[in-house]
């Protein structure tokens, strides 16, 4: 069994969701007697080639070409199709990031392969490949079986554990030759979003504000708390629609799905659409001045109180503890 992991990188590091995909591939390979191959795509990415071995890869394929300098979906798809053919991979794993979801579907179409997206767990036993997926805004977990020859899955960030880094490990590195690009699509410009440096889907701590924040300026309170906790700021759709926060920070059914260790929610009612994006958080703390707010029934910890009193007190307490 050969498992190909399509990695992503940023600032000369593999992104955490890619390390998580490598960790899951390692677990499956160990259980089934298989091999993990990491694919690195980009331009000038030679410095990354030693990283995958530390996180579970047996071998590394490097596709280094100008056409891959940016995550161009068609160029990436073509490189991945080449990698699948070269390695004979039967399983292909992607991080369920925006780019991963985009390219995975193109690769699945190109290979006529089954695709399970945004998976919460994988169960692979010999020829059996099953994936757990959250459906209907998190109301049910479906266990789907892929029956195709090649099986593809994208893995929700912050759900799968990363292997403990082992710098003594090394992997065989091969170059994947990429022919000159012949895409019908031209990437003209990439504009960085206005959101935080760490994407909220990758953060361990998310501090979210809703309509109860009352103004964009008041989000400074949440930024301070997020800084103290080493987290990032998120927003409900009400706060995004009001123009208080960028769309890249929206959590929920029409925003992003997050699975942090800690999710703090201030001045938000806990609508089903918001819950759909954050119910996978390991610990949910909500602060609402209305004791009947639905979120207070669902949260692990609820505080009935005025966020404008609670947030500064929390920030101060965290700063004291963390020195
Ligand atoms: C198709 C569809 C998709 C949607 N997708 C999303 C989505 O992706 N994400 C999302 O978030 N929403 C989404 N929504 C919108 C969703 O239905 C809710 O309208 C929205 O989540 C409400 O945001 P909120 O909780 O910030 O605001 P509200 O529901 O207005 O809640 C504000 C809360 O703040 C509390 N509050 C006010 N002042 C204070 C204070 N000083 N201290 C403490 N608490 C205070 C109030 O008691 C209240 O409970 C979607 C809706 C639809 C129809």
Image: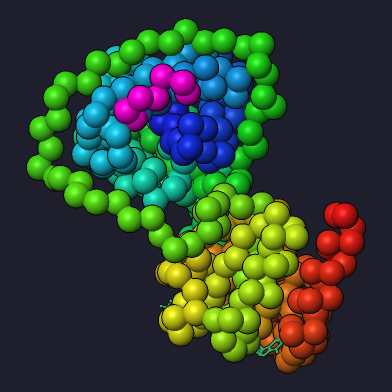
Q: Residue at x 10, y 42 (%)?
A: 184
Please provide percent x and percent y for residue 98: 39, 51
Q: Is residue 198 above or below residue 217?
A: above
Q: Is residue 269 above or below residue 226?
A: below
Please provide percent x and percent y for residue 14: 51, 33
Q: Is residue 288 left or right of residue 21?
A: right
Front one among 220 and 199: 220
Please provide percent x and percent y for residue 123: 55, 35
Segment tinted magenta in the rendering: 42-48
Q: Is residue 13 above or below residue 286?
A: above
Q: Is residue 323 magenta?
A: no
Q: Is residue 90 left or right of residue 284?
A: left
On the question of residue 300 being in view, the answer is yes
Q: Quadrant of residue 295?
A: bottom right
Front one among 263 and 118: 263
Q: Residue at x 55, y 52 (%)?
A: 198
Q: Residue at x 24, y 29 (%)?
A: 66
Quadrant of the rendered image holding ligand 1? bottom right
Please provide percent x and percent y for residue 158: 60, 47
The colour scheme applied to this rendered structure is rainbow
Q: Is residue 196 left or right of residue 228?
A: left
Q: How many dots with numbers?
A: 0
On the question of residue 263 being in view, the answer is no
Front one among 123 and 309: 309
Front one among 239 and 300: 239
Q: Residue at x 44, y 36 (%)?
A: 8
The C terminus sits in image quarter: bottom right
Q: Quadrant of residue 168?
A: top right
């Amino acid at each position: 069994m050969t498992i190909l992991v399509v990695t992503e990188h940023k600032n000369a590091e593999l992104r955490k969701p890619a390390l998580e995909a490598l960790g899951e591939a390692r677990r499956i390979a160990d259980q089934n007697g298989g091999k993990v191959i990491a694919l690195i795509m980009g331009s000038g990415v030679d410095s990354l080639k030693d990283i995958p071995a530390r996180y579970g890869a047996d071998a590394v394929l490097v596709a280094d070409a100008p056409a891959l300098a940016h995550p161009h979906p068609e160029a990436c798809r073509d490189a991945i199709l080449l990698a699948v053919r070269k390695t004979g991979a039967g399983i292909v794993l992607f991080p369920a990031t925006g780019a991963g979801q985009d390219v995975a579907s193109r690769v699945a179409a190109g290979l006529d392969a089954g695709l399970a997206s945004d998976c919460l767990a994988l169960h692979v036993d010999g020829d059996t490949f099953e994936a757990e997926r959250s459906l209907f805004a998190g109301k049910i977990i479906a266990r789907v079986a892929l029956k195709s020859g090649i099986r593809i899955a994208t893995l929700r960030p912050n759900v799968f554990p990363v292997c403990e880094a082992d710098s003594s490990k090394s992997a065989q590195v091969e170059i994947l030759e990429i022919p000159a690009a012949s895409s019908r699509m031209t990437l003209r410009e990439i504009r960085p979003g206005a959101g935080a440096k760490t994407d909220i889907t990758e953060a361990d701590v998310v501090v979210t504000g809703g309509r109860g924040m009352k103004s964009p300026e008041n989000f400074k309170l949440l930024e301070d708390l997020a800084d103290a906790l080493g987290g990032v700021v998120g927003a409900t759709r009400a706060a995004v629609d009001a123009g208080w926060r960028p769309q890249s920070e929206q959590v929920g059914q029409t925003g992003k799905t997050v699975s942090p260790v800690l999710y703090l929610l201030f001045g938000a009612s806990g609508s089903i659409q918001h819950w759909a994006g954050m119910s996978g958080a390991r610990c949910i703390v909500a602060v609402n001045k209305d004791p009947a707010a639905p979120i207070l029934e669902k949260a692990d910890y609820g505080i009935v109180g005025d966020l404008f009193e609670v947030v500064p007190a929390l920030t101060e307490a965290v700063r004291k503890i963390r020195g």
